[in-house]
Image: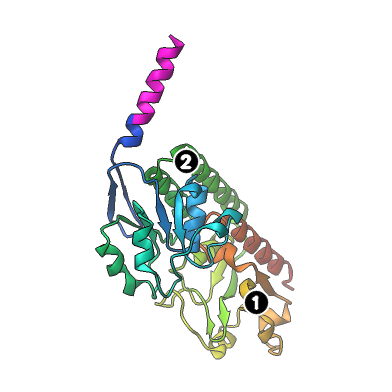
């Protein structure tokens, strides 16, 4: 009897592995595979992290520059960067799925990928919930739901716990500085603004029409945020440039903070840690109020 049950389980697993898979991507496009993908190319660092979280790290045959997490990602062959993709190399890798990210530089190359006839999944979470959703859908496409679904549930649980912790905290107006040369930030369209909202922060440039707008120092000084946050990735985004402006509320209250950029600027599972760090710093800024 046990042998029959085991054989039936193997058969069911084999049937599931061969069954067509259909999901919608972040653009709302239907993506259908004849069977779960075994060879995938990740066209953004956050995509690589999502695939590893979904249990499909060993199925990534190609990735782009800066796909450096987790450690195993550093060994994945490169197919280009955010400016230029080597189409011949992509074709030679014979992927059965390509996961893309539609940043400005990539749009020019999307037609080249489409001509290869390989299914494309667009990954671009704009809300924190989208991270867990991406893990689940990539798990479906890769046939790794046994890993992906519990991972997605854990991500949701951790964000929910933080939301509960900070839901009734006083709002705090802040400036999120991504780069300082030129000076640019992120608008309310960015997933980072969802982290800011969860923590009880108010993005002073949330109403900008562009996701990553360039802004002037004068605009920041006029808005007079209570705190300024800069990323530390690659030593850019330094908040030290604001120190000479003693009338700025963020300077007066000693609320110039540095954050690890790739924990927040990549829409992947590590945004749990990035959001936690952001919330803690926003709470520290609240404590500096007179």
Between 125 and 215, the one lying in front of the other is 125
Q: Residue 113 lies in magenta, yes or no? A: no
Task: Please report the bounds of the magenta region as a residue range.
Answer: 1-14
Crowding at dot 1, Cα within 10 Å, few <14 / some 14-19 / many 20+, comes out as: few
* Residue 15 point in image, percent of width and height: 32, 30
**Circle on res. 149:** 2
Q: At x 62% / y 71%, what residue is drawn?
A: 233
**Above or below — where is 161 with respect to 285?**
above
* Residue 90 point in image, percent of width and height: 37, 62
Q: Quadrant of residue 113?
A: bottom left
Q: Residue 2 lies in magenta, yes or no? A: yes
Q: Give the residue pinned by disc 1.
A: 235
Mark toward the start of the polypeptide (2 vs 1): 2
**Above or below — where is 132 with respect to 172?**
above
**Circle on res. 56:** none
Q: At x 27% / y 61%, what residue is drawn?
A: 116
Left or right of residue 90, residue 270 in this image: right
Left or right of residue 252, residue 260 in this image: left
* Residue 145 point in image, percent of width and height: 44, 39
**Above or below — where is 214 with respect to 83?**
below
* Residue 79 point in image, percent of width and height: 43, 65
The answer, for residue 278, to whether it is visible in the render is yes
Q: At x 49% / y 57%, what residue is drawn?
A: 48
Between 74 and 47, the one lying in front of the other is 74
**The C terminus - image quarter:** bottom right
- As measured in the structure, the alpha-carbon distance from the residue carrying label 2 to the one carrying label 1 is 36 Å
Q: At x 48% / y 64%, what residue is drawn?
A: 78
Q: Secondary structure beneath disc 2?
A: helix
**The N terminus - image quarter:** top left
The mark lying in front, picked from 2 and 1, is: 1
């Amino acid at each position: 009897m046990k042998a029959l049950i085991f054989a039936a389980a193997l058969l069911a697993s084999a049937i599931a592995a061969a069954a067509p898979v259909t999901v919608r991507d972040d653009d709302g496009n239907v993506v259908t595979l004849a069977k779960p993908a075994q060879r995938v190319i990740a066209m953004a660092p956050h995509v690589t992290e999502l695939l590893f979280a979904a249990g499909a790290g060993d199925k990534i045959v190609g990735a782009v520059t800066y796909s450096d997490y987790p450690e195993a990602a550093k060994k994945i062959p490169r197919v280009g960067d955010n400016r230029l993709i080597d189409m011949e190399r992509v074709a030679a890798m014979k992927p059965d799925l390509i996961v893309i990210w539609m940043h400005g530089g990539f749009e020019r190359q999307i037609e080249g990928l489409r001509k290869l006839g390989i299914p494309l999944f667009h990954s671009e979470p704009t809300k924190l919930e989208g991270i867990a959703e991406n893990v689940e859908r990539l798990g479906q496409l890769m046939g790794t739901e046994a890993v992906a679904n519990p991972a997605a549930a854990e991500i949701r649980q951790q964000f929910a716990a933080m939301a509960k912790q900070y839901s009734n905290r006083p709002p705090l107006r802040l400036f999120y500085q991504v780069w300082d040369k030129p000076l640019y930030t992120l608008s309310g369209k960015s997933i980072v603004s969802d982290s800011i909202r969860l923590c009880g922060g108010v993005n002073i440039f949330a109403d900008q029409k562009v996701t990553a707008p360039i802004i002037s120092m004068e605009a920041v000084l006029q808005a007079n945020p209570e705190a300024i946050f800069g990323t530390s990735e690659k030593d850019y985004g330094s908040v030290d440039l604001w120190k000479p402006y003693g009338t700025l509320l963020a300077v007066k209250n000693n609320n110039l903070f540095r954050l690890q950029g790739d924990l927040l600027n990549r829409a992947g599972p590590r945004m749990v840690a990035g959001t936690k760090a952001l919330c803690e710093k926003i709470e520290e800024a609240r404590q500096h109020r007179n």
